[in-house]
Amino acid sequence: MAAPSQKALLETVPTSLFIGGEWRAAENGATFEVHDPATGRVLAHVADGSPADGLAALDAAAAAQADWAKVAPRERAELLRAAFEKLTERIEEFALLMTLEMGKPLAEARGEVTYGAEFFRWFSEEAVRIHGRYAVAPNGATRLVTMKQPVGPTLMITPWNFPLAMGTRKIGPALAAGCTMVVKPAHETPLSMLALAQLLDELGVPKGVLNVVPTAHSGALMEPLIRDPRARKLTFTGSTGVGRKLVEQSAQQLLRLSMELGGNAPFIVFEDADIDAAVRGAMLAKMRNIGEACTAANRFFVHESVAAEFATKFADAMAALSIGKGTVKGVEVGPLITAKARAGVDELVQDAIGKGARALTGGVALPGKGFFYAPTVLADVPASARLLTEEIFGPVAPVASFSDEADAIARANDTEFGLVGYVFTKDLSRAIRVAEALEFGMVGINQGIVSNPAAPFGGVKQSGFGREGGFEGIEEYLETKYVGIAL
């Protein structure tokens, strides 16, 4: 499908709240601006949901829960399959919309639409495979029946960096399991979620099953919902700091939680690795989504015998990237999401350089409109540099060397985070040893991308808990009920 003009596309995207199957203005009439990070221009004014609007959305979700839970699994599956097909058909308009509000190049945005749609296809197949078990009690006097039932109304908070896929990764299993939901998209990028809600509404998702409440005041809107006893689950993708606050707020209601939080991913290159393949993997692990991803490689540990070769080739590849507005053909690196985000990235880079690191390429914010930062490779990064302990969230790659396998593992694990790690080696035994020793929820061996709808995504330690995707993904939205039957 050919992409419409930017103006025509923006005119078709709803900018209201979606509550109980109806598009409505915010209760107080307030709106907030959505900006193009490549130019700073205002794309749209979106309804700014209030706490009262949030409670109205939860009212709708709670009212729809019982009926949605009774819908046949095949019917829920067919809705999800139709959503996959329609989203795939409309890839160009969703990609353009995402590029406009988030900044990523169109090629990457198309990839996100494809990736996001796959969650609908995957969970359409899982919807009809929800099952329990039947067993005989050890004493033979009772039959033990376990069954799976939907958790219930679910609160969803999605991030700005993957504004479509982080929604489908939550909405897909919730619909499949029979849960209703209230979605609060990031205020930086609400348009993709509102367009998705419009698509699902057109496909016949019943009123009240999906509710979307954008707001520029997330804490004020979400806290009353989290403390409301009708909400039975909270799923959040975002920073660890915010995640901690949400866990605290949810304790009163003992909400079922899924937390996909920050990362500090190590990228380990051993001396026997194919260096050219490692550089290609590093480009994927670092530059996917302009480096604005929790899975982005944050710390590059390279064996001292190949560190110089790797860093030089990596810097050459980074320097060759084309930078600009994501809608321009051939652009490979778009802007960061805000001026504040760019300033934070530069602060980390200057801290490292001030402590002795060398910029092999980049290391500067780019002048002009938009929030652009030059792709950067830093060599000889000292252990005291902040960017080895803090999530960078930008196109910056710090390279440090290690001496042996034990050293590499120790340095990789020396972080409070535990989302994903990457390992490049030709030695299968080493690959297994290191994967088992790394304290991360996911490990990529000789590849720079691990995300896959068919695999469980999630971390350990301060990177959160719960899994999204894979067979495990739907379990997060199901409760287990045991029925004992006396004979």
Image (cartoon, grey):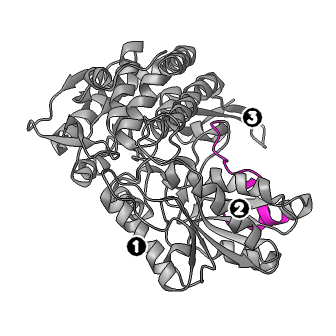
Marks 3 & 1, CB-CB < 8 Å contact? no
The residue singled out by tag 1 in the image is 347
Q: Nearer the viewer, mark 3 or mark 1?
A: 1
In this rendering, is residue 132 above or below 161? Answer: above
Would residue 424 appear left or right of 147 to someone viewing this image? right
Residue identifier under label 2:
313
Q: Amino acid at mark 2?
A: Lys
The residue type indicated by label 3 comes to: Ala
Q: Is residue 382 above or below residue 343?
A: below
Q: Read off the magenta span.
A: 432-453
Residue 297 at x, y percent in the picture = 61, 60
Local SS, label 3: strand
Q: Residue at x 68, y 51 (%)?
A: 448
Residue 445, magenta (yes or no): yes
Q: Residue at x 64, y 53 (%)?
A: 283
**Residue 153: percent from the left, percent from the top?**
38, 36
